[in-house]
Image (tube, helix red, strand yellow):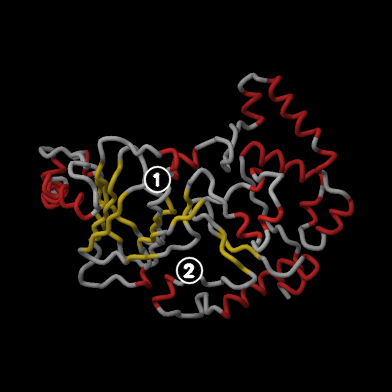
Amino acid sequence: IDLGNIKNDSKMAKELPSLMKLKSALYSSTYRSFVEQITNLEPNTLTDQVDCAANCHTKGCHLLCHDDVIGTRKVSYIIYLTDPDTAWTDEDGGRLELYDNFDEEKDDNDDDDNDDDDNKKGKSDKDEAIISNNGRKVPGVIPCKTILPTFNSLAYFVVTPGVSFHSVQEVFCDRPRLSIQGWYHAKEAPSDIENATLNRLKSTAKGEDTEGSFMPLRQIVDNGNEKKAAAAAAAASSKDDDESLTPSDKSYLAKFLNPTYLQDKYIDEIRECFENESSVQLRHFFNEEWSSKVKSATSLMDENDKLGKDHRRPSSSSVEYDVGVCDKWIPVGPAHKQRFLEYVGDDDDDVDDSVA
């Protein structure tokens, strides 16, 4: 329910008298002054703009990592109104997850080819990759702090581009995660709003994952720009000789993949689908032998970590974000874009042993 846009004399306001009183108190000058004090903001930083809602997260609901920066938002808050008679536990999920921020890793393509090799001594490849990119920050892979949505508790933080990273853990239980959530606004948007996660994800600037504009070939043709479509098709065709799979490539990949995906006809169809839709789903990707190996290996790891419906782990296990992490599997972020485990174990020659 968007409380900010409910007029005090409306029918809905009369049906929600307690919420309306709470909204009035939260955005009163007295309480705004209190918020400025506890967040170390200058007096009169916050305006009287009302921006809040009553939220209900049910089983399966969650929010991905973001920094909350939109427009003039300055302070974010959430008041938890979960069932007071049954305490919310780790097993229920729904925690507020907070992240540390780190200097963004510079793209390898931006590295100076003339770097002095002597300056690289004593640094690992990972160390070398951690280079500040215009002072921008990214969140860590896993939360550094989590907070249970305990009844009658308040969480808040100052909204800062590329800093105030947070997410909401999936709700595991059948009970609703009720809350009043909103923002206090400043007079102006932050000067570095271009570093906000929303702006970054939408950006097509140099160095971004989304660098450059994108338009499917089908859309280019539909727009009547056949010359541009022909040029794009020609550019793609010119790369075919260099990028096509050789017989040797196919022979190697056939050890692992479904043979259907190695046929030129289907490779072309997959590429066309990806160019037009920006995504593609490949079912039964591995061949039967490797599908069985991968399933056995992952099932064994789940058994070792006591995961799955056959195991009842302690309630605290819901915040064990390092499950599955080991010397061969490392977490990869940043969390506002992705979070997965990457295999960094044996070389290709030892791949059979890694899942045997």
Looking at the image, is mark 2 or mark 1 earlier in the sequence? Answer: 1
The image quadrant that residue 117 belongs to is: bottom right
Question: 261 or 248, which lies in front?
Answer: 248
Spot occupied by residue 197 in the image (x, y as percentages of width and height): 45, 45
Helix, strand or loop for disc 2: loop
| Image point (10%, 44%), residue name | 14
For residue 118, the mark is none
Q: Mark 2 — residue? A: 321
Circles 2 and 1, Cβ within 8 Å, touching? The answer is: no
Q: Quadrant of residue 126?
A: bottom right
Q: Position of residue 82 (x, y in %)?
A: 25, 64
Q: Which residue is mark 1?
A: 161
Q: Residue at x 66, y 24 (%)?
A: 221
Quadrant in the picture for residue 149: bottom left
Question: The C terminus is located in which quarter?
Answer: bottom right
Is disc 2 surrounded by few (<14), some (14 to 19) or many (20+) residues within 10 Å? few
The residue type indicated by label 1 comes to Pro
Q: Residue furthest right?
A: 247
Element marked by disc 1? loop
Q: Position of residue 55 (x, y in %)?
A: 28, 52
Question: Dot 1, crowdedness within 10 Å: few (<14), some or many (≥20)?
Answer: many
Task: Compare residues 167 and 278 and report the one nearer the observer.
Answer: 167
Residue pictured at 57% horizontal, 51% vertical? 131
Image coordinates for residue 254, horizontal then vertical, percent = 82, 59
- Is residue 74 shown above or below 80? above
